[in-house]
Each structure stands twice: as C-alpha cells, then as structure tokens.
Image: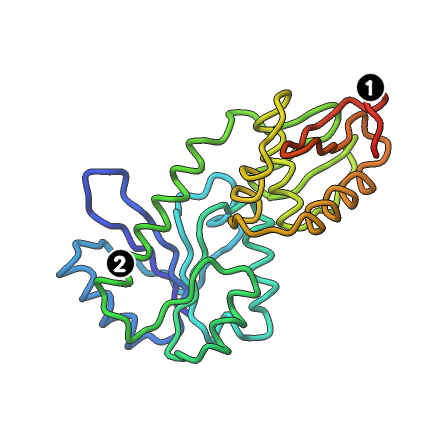
C-alpha cells in the first residue's frame, strides 16, 4: 500500500493531501499528471502511519483513500480512527466504481466526497482544493480554546464532548447543535440559523427539532443549563431560572 503526500504549488499555504493507494501504476501516472500540469509535489511512503500523520498537529489538510481499501474490512474502523486521532480535514474516497450504491455506501461512513479515477484531473484538483479551503476557513472561525460552559466541554479536534470530565455520547448533529448554541450564548440562536449550521439545511421539521432538544436535555441531566426554545429562537438557559413547557 502506498501513501502519497500531494502538495499544490501556489501563493497560499500549500494544501497537503495524504493519499492512500494500492494501485502503483495508477499512482505513478497521476503523479506525473499532477506534477507536470498542476505543479504538485508528490512524496511517497510505503505505509502510512495514521498515528503520526492524523493527530491534532497533522501537517495534512486532507486524506484521499482508494475505494478498495476503504471498503475493506478495516475501512470503517480506519475512518473512525482518523477522526479519533483528532484529524479535522476532509476525507475523500477515490474509485473506479461510478454506481450510486457505492457512492452512498461511502458517504454513509462519513467521508466528505466520493471521487472517480476517470474524473478529469482538473475536476479532481478543484474538488480537493475547494474542500480544503472550506475546512481552512472553518478552522479560522474556531475559538482559540475549546468551547465550554459549566462543565460541558467540546473537543473540536476529536468531535467529542465531556460533561464534568465524563464522556458524553453525541451524534454528529447533536455535536453541531451544541457548537451553534455555544457560539451564540448568552444570546439566543435563531431557529433558521441552527437549521442551516447544524443540519446544513433550512428544511427541518419542528418535531425533529423538539426531539433533538429533548434528547440533549436528557443526555445532559445534572448540567446547570437546559436547551429551551421560545418561538423562533432557542437558548441555553441556566437551570432553575426557567421552566420547560
């Protein structure tokens, strides 16, 4: 298995991509294409060490994994391991399989995008660059210290949370809900803003919102704040100062 480091030559900080690929012939061809046409500098390793490459101090902006390896026995575990190590950049799958079923299978595992090996190099390069830029912009918006409130702490690198130093099991959407509420606290958060930032969609049923708020309040029993909705706004209210309807 080969891992490649792709560095795009540009005036901005060079995006670096850890590429895990077992097709050496294809890898060499793409290496020549990227190097000659798009000024990518390609470095190769025989085996990628996830522990040293994907931690909080990782020098990589994105990870590109071959479909065959991603679908293998260790594929889903590897995705979780990469995120668990603190890697916050985009993860892509690269494949010859253009079927919708395969694409949905990989997206369901949590990858950011599904790319085809027959895709024009220009498109592949743009997709990588655009995703990396979006993640860089998000990191710039993140606070210097982890968001925390009255014992509830959010770990942005690991996408995890603790309540009074104990692990708090949150889904991806639940984690985003708290991040949005923390960002606006102590001011209320407009419901439309929460939908767009947590679900990335303006179409979220009121019943879905209520269910998530109820589940989060239940998960955080013992915390001194509760999620309270009032009309078209939602807030983190100090427990005891308001009552939940």
In the figure, 186 relative to 39: above or below?
above
Q: Residues within 10 Å of mark 2 (few under 14, many from 20)?
A: some
Q: Residues within 10 Å of mark 1 (few under 14, many from 20)?
A: few
Where is residue 210? Give x, y as percent: 73, 45
In primary-sequence order, the first of circles 1 and 2 is 2
**Count of numbered marks:** 2
Residue under the point 28% across and 71% down: 119
Placement of the N terminus among the 4 image quadrants: bottom left
What residue is disc 2 on? 125
From the viewer's side, name the closer residue of 151 and 240. 240
In the figure, 175 relative to 45: above or below?
above
Q: Is residue 187 left or right of residue 130?
A: right
In the figure, 65 relative to 240: above or below?
below
Where is residue 62? Give x, y as percent: 40, 52
Look at the image and name its color scheme. Answer: rainbow
Residue under the point 32% across and 50% down: 130
Q: Secondary structure at mark 1?
A: loop
What residue is disc 1 on? 241
* Residue farthest front in this picture: 231
Q: Is residue 182 left or right of residue 34?
A: right
Residue under the point 38% across and 44% down: 134
Q: Secondary structure at mark 2?
A: helix
Q: Is residue 11 left or right of residue 27?
A: left
From the viewer's side, name the closer residue of 4 and 208. 208
Label 1, label 2: how far apart the Cα atoms are: 53 Å
């Amino acid at each position: 298995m080969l891992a490649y480091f792709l560095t795009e030559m540009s005036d901005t900080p060079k995006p670096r991509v850890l590429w895990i690929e077992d097709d050496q012939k294809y890898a060499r061809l793409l290496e020549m294409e990227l190097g000659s046409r798009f000024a990518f500098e390609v470095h190769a390793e025989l085996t990628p060490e996830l522990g040293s490459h994907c931690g909080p101090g990782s020098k990589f902006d994105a990870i590109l994994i071959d479909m065959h390896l991603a679908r293998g026995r260790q594929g889903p575990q590897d995705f979780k391991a990469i995120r668990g190590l603190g890697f916050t950049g985009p993860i892509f799958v690269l494949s010859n399989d253009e079927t919708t079923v395969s694409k949905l299978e990989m997206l369901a595992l949590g990858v950011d995008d599904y790319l085809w090996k027959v895709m024009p190099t220009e498109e592949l390069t743009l997709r990588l660059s655009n995703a990396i830029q979006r993640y860089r912009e998000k990191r710039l918006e993140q606070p210097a210290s982890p968001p925390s409130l009255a014992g509830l702490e959010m770990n942005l690198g690991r996408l995890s949370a603790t309540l009074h130093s104990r692990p708090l099991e949150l889904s991806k959407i639940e984690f985003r809900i708290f991040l949005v509420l923390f960002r606006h606290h102590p001011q209320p958060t407009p419901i439309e803003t929460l939908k767009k930032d947590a679900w990335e969609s303006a179409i979220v049923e009121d019943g879905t919102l209520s269910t998530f708020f109820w589940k989060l309040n239940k998960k955080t029993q013992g915390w001194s704040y509760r999620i309270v909705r009032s009309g078209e706004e939602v807030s983190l209210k100090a427990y005891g100062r308001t009552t939940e309807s």
